[in-house]
Image (cartoon, rainbow, N blue to C red):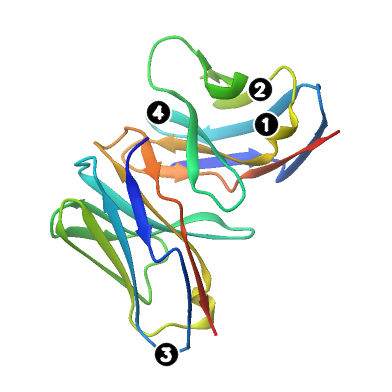
Amino acid sequence: AQSVTQLGSHVSVSEGALVLLRCNYSSSVPPYLFWYVQYPNQGLQLLLKYTTGATLVKGINGFEAEFKKSETSFHLTKPSAHMSDAAEYFCAVSVSQFYFGTGTSLTVIP
Amino acid sequence: DAGITQSPRHKVTETGTPVTLRCHQTENHRYMYWYRQDPGHGLRLIHYSYGVKDTDKGEVSDGYSVSRSKTEDFLLTLESATSSQTSVYFCASQQDSGNTIYFGEGSWLTVV
C-alpha cells in the first residue's frame, strides 16, 4: 500500500529564514512525487514534480525538493521565506493513483 | 494550467435536498476526480473517472454518485444532502495515470 506522511501540520518560519517541509512516502514501486501549494480559498497548484532523472527538482517561486530513495523522502525547501509563501502545502505520490499527504500549513512571521 | 471550472462555486442547501456539482475541463484529459477537503483530513477522494461512462469509488463515496457522459464534464451528486457533507469540493483532471493532476478552484457547500 502507498502512503504519504507530512511531518508537522503547522510550520512557522521568520521572513528570510529557511523553509523546510518534510514528506516521507511508502511505495512498493518507484513513484512519481509532487508538491502542491494551496493559497486561501483557492485550488491546489503544482509547485514541482519528480518523475525520473535528476533527484533535485526545482519548482516555481524558488522552491526545490530532493528525492532521496534510500530515505523514501521528498522534502521541500526554500532558502529564504517570503510573506507570500504563507499557504498550505501538500506532498503527493503517484503510483497507479494519487495519494496526498494531509498537508502542512506554513506561516511566515514578519 | 489546465482549464477546469467548477459550478456552483458556493452553495447553501437544506438537509435532505439533492445537490449536483459540475466540473468542466477543456484539456481533453482522460481522468477526472472529485475530492473533498476538510480540516484535519486533507484531501479525500470521493469518486473518479477513467473515461466516458467509466467511474469508480474512492475512499469516501457513501452518499455520493457521479456521472460522466462527455469527456469534458464530470458531475458529482449528493442524493440527499446531510450536514456531514458540508465541505469544500475540488474537481481535478489528469491526462494519464501518473501525470500531474490539475485542480479546479473549489466549490464551497454548506448543508443546513
Residue A21, numbered label: 1
Instruction: Give the left or right position of residue A23, taking residue A49 as reference.
Output: right
Relative to A20, residue B27 above or below: below
Mark nearer the N terminus (1 vs 2): 1
How far across and down, in percent of the image, does residue A37 sit?
56, 38
Q: Amino acid at mark 1?
A: Leu
How far across and down, in percent of the image, does residue B8 sit?
40, 66
Question: Which residue is pictured at 38% across the width and 41% down the height?
Answer: B102
Q: Amino acid at mark 4?
A: Tyr
Task: Tell me the distance, in whole angstroms, between the alpha carbons under discs 3 and 1.
Answer: 41 Å
How far across and down, in percent of the image, does residue B42 sit?
56, 53
Residue A75 quadrant: top right
Q: Are marks 2 and 4 in contact (CB under 8 Å)?
A: no
Residue B16, numbered label: 3
The residue beneath circle 4 is: A32
Task: Tell me the distance, in whole angstroms, between the alpha carbons under discs 1 and 4.
Answer: 18 Å
Q: What chain is tagged by disc 4?
A: A
Q: Amino acid at mark 2?
A: Thr
Q: Are marks 3 and 4 in contact (CB under 8 Å)?
A: no
Looking at the rendering, in which quadrant would you find the N terminus of chain B?
top left
Question: Which residue is pictured at 40% across the width and 29% down the height?
Answer: A31
SS type, badge 1: strand
In the foreground, A94 or A49:
A49
The answer as to whether the residues below labels 1 and 2 share one chain is yes
